[in-house]
Amino acid sequence: MEITIVQVFAKTARLLQRLPLVAVLELPYLLQMLTVLGLTSWVTVQYRQITVADLATSLREETTDRVLAYVDHQLSGAARLNASHVAAVETGLLDLNDFEQMGRFFWQQMQIYPVDYLNYGNQAGEFIGVERLDNGTLVINETRRDNLKQMTIYQTDAEGHRTQVEAIDPADPIQSEAWYAEAAVAGHPLWSPVYAWDDQPNVLSISASQPLYDAQGQLMGVMGTDLLLTHISQFLSTVHVSPSTQIFIVEPSGLLVASSDGHPPYTVVDGQAQRQLATQSANPLVRATAERLIQGRLLETAASATMTLRLGSGRQFVSVTPWQDDLGLDWVVVVVVPEADFLSQADAFARTTLLLALLSVAVAVLLALLTDRWINRPIANLAQASRAIAHGDRTQTVEVQGIRELKTLASAFNQMAAQVADTFAQLENRVTQRTAELATAKVAAEAANQSKNVFLANMSHQLRTPLNIVLGFIQVMQKDAALSAQHQASLTSMRHSADYLLAQINNLLLASKLDGEGQLAATPSWFDLGELLQDLQTQFSAWRGQPAVALRFDLQVPIPQLVYTDETKLRQILLNLLENAFKFTTAGQVTLRLVGQPQHSGPTDDLSPVALPEATGDYTLTFTVTDTGPGIDCHDLGRLFCPFEQLEPGQRSQRGSGLGLFICQEYVRLLGGELCCHSHPGEGSCFHFDLEVKGSCQTLTYHFPTADNSSTLAATSPPEAEHLMALPSTWRERLRVAAAKGDDRAILTLLEDLPTEDAALGDWLHHWAINYQFDLILELIEGATPDA
């Protein structure tokens, strides 16, 4: 689609019509300023980039040359020192069998040459060496053939003579050490791989090793000179190029040799030194640079290279230079110079240039200020007065002198402001009247609510009294053996209806109390938590509302025996949650899980007139009630704890009034917790809450009902597997099959014919079966099977 010049002018005209007056008047000055600043910035950036690049290149080359000279001097010196020692042996100046002479000779050599270790080892496993310690002193290390598993360390005097034994350390065979083994196999001088000292894993060194042969060509031993990589790192840290410049040496494999940042090129794990890759360095600049070099395969090339990388907040100038020698050493020296370290010099020139540009901009700004004072300021005053009126200040007036059009605009604005003030005054009078009416209605509503609460309390009392009498008569009539079965069934139905009605009345009364302010408060006291749980287990084990649903208690110790909280409200919470779980679960199980978590213990205040236990502490008790019912849709969870709200499953069952969970939530909040629900349709529901309580340090001992509910069995240690050995193998096999299938009814049937007098074993198997702990039964059976 073609656009003509006329259309372009038309669009430009429409754009200018939408521009504010200030933009139209000051646009020429703004264009002038942007032009000057743009040209100045472009020139400054170009000059700065050229200057910084040239300076960084010069510094990289100078730094690289300095590092290479140091490395070449140190490493070639070590190789030459080895060669001189071999020459001394060949000319007879040094006797390899006289370790006393060799120790003094090595000691004198280390007074002259800046190496860290001179040593010699022979094929017999003997070793003689002189080590430079961190404090600069020299010690002689010696292992003789009479005890090759021991190294003796001698202190020395000012002339290199041995003075006294400093320590005796265990010694490994020298044939297994890298500096000896590599040279013995190669048969010519070489550098050993970087390795850690056995007795000092935090010391990494590299050894120039040279094998010695006799006239028949037989290997006599290996002469070695060690250099510590720490000294190379110390030298690199002294090379000051710029504040953020990093210098590091790596092998082509990426392993760090030395760096200027002070971080060691290794990590110590379980007492063993492990070399570190440059990509794992603690220095982010070294780590990022190494990653780029490895990606570009620049560590594997034999040629020098320079590059510019953009890492972090700016550019980094990098030089990569390989260093190799005749003994097989292959290192790469990397110098990284950040651009930011040199921007200050380039910015000095930029500031001078910008000052000239600002001088030109100042003229344009002065003209803009004059225009603003003449035209824009009166218009701004009108806008400010309009905003003040919008924020409620309706006393604003504007006076304008000078331009006729602006004076006319100011007069019209003042008339409008007066009309707005009059209108708002009338509205405020109406709002005041309406507010008084609402206050009166609020007082009436509060009075009605108070009357409702009083009415509910009186009515619940009036209803519960005759209802309890009815329940009493029903219980008395049920004990009459002369009644027919049909009459007994009718009485049972009447009792269930009366119990249901009494529960709804109680819930309604509780809801009315919870709805009022200050009606209920927690009344904590010390009570036995085990008795409360056993009461719940006894009550719901006899539940016949859903006979196909099993009840399981899962207690995770440590749980205090005695706790300090409101026992009545806690009992009501658990009763309501368990009753709801049984109400909506038709098959499977309902589980009450209690987890105790001790907190920091300290002196306990006297919280109750009842005497406190001798040893108490703070506990977090987590109560969880889960079921295998139909579950709750996620869209309905928000209405779950609202009073008189029933979800679809509750409406279908036509049981309850929608107050149980509301009461539970309010009670949990009174005790300092929050009741939460997690559920998915078809996967059951889970209600849980945490309580912070005081508790005794005595661990809870809980009890389980036996098969006939006639006695209780304490939760003691489980029986040994040998208890089953007295039973016939066929009986154990039948029990194993039933447990593997998870058939608790079959297990209970087998227990009735238990062919042993071990009652404890039968009680434990019964408890495990009714609590679905078939894995424990299988474990006990497998332990009692001789072939297992």
Image (tube, rainbow, N blue to C red):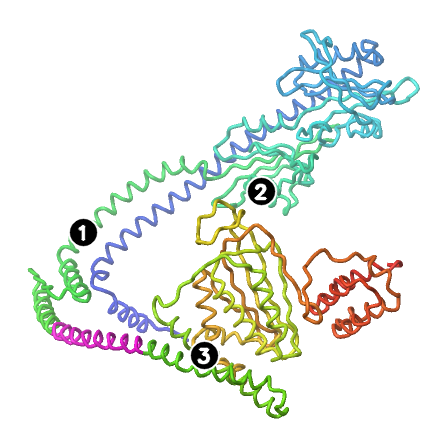
Relative to 248, say whether 616 is above or below: below
Q: Amino acid at mark 3?
A: Glu
Mark toward the viewer: 1 or 3: 3
* Overall secondary structure of the magenta section: helix
Relative to 270, say whether 391 is above or below: below
Q: Is residue 444 magenta?
A: yes
Residue 367, labelled with which disc? 1
Q: Amino acid at mark 2?
A: Thr
Helix, strand, or loop for circle 2?
helix
Residue 289, labelled with which disc? 2
Relative to 143, say whether 406 is above or below: below
Q: How far apart in space, not on screen, are marks 2 and 3 (Cα)?
A: 64 Å
Q: Which residues are magenta?
A: 423-451
Assess disc 3: are there few (<14), some (14-19) or many (≥20) residues with their C-alpha within 10 Å of its C-alpha.
some
Q: Position of residue 517 (x, y in %)?
A: 34, 68
Q: Position of residue 470 (x, y in %)?
A: 49, 84
Q: Is residue 441 magenta?
A: yes
Q: Earlier in the sequence, mark 1 or mark 3?
A: 1
Q: How far apart in space, not on screen, are marks 1 and 2 (Cα)?
A: 52 Å
- The one of 438 and 487 positioned closer to us in this rendering: 487
Look at the image and tell me whether residue 255 can be seen.
yes
Helix, strand, or loop for circle 1?
helix
- The one of 260 and 617 positioned closer to us in this rendering: 617
Residue 55, labelled with which disc? none
The C terminus - image quarter: bottom right
Mark toward the viewer: 2 or 3: 3
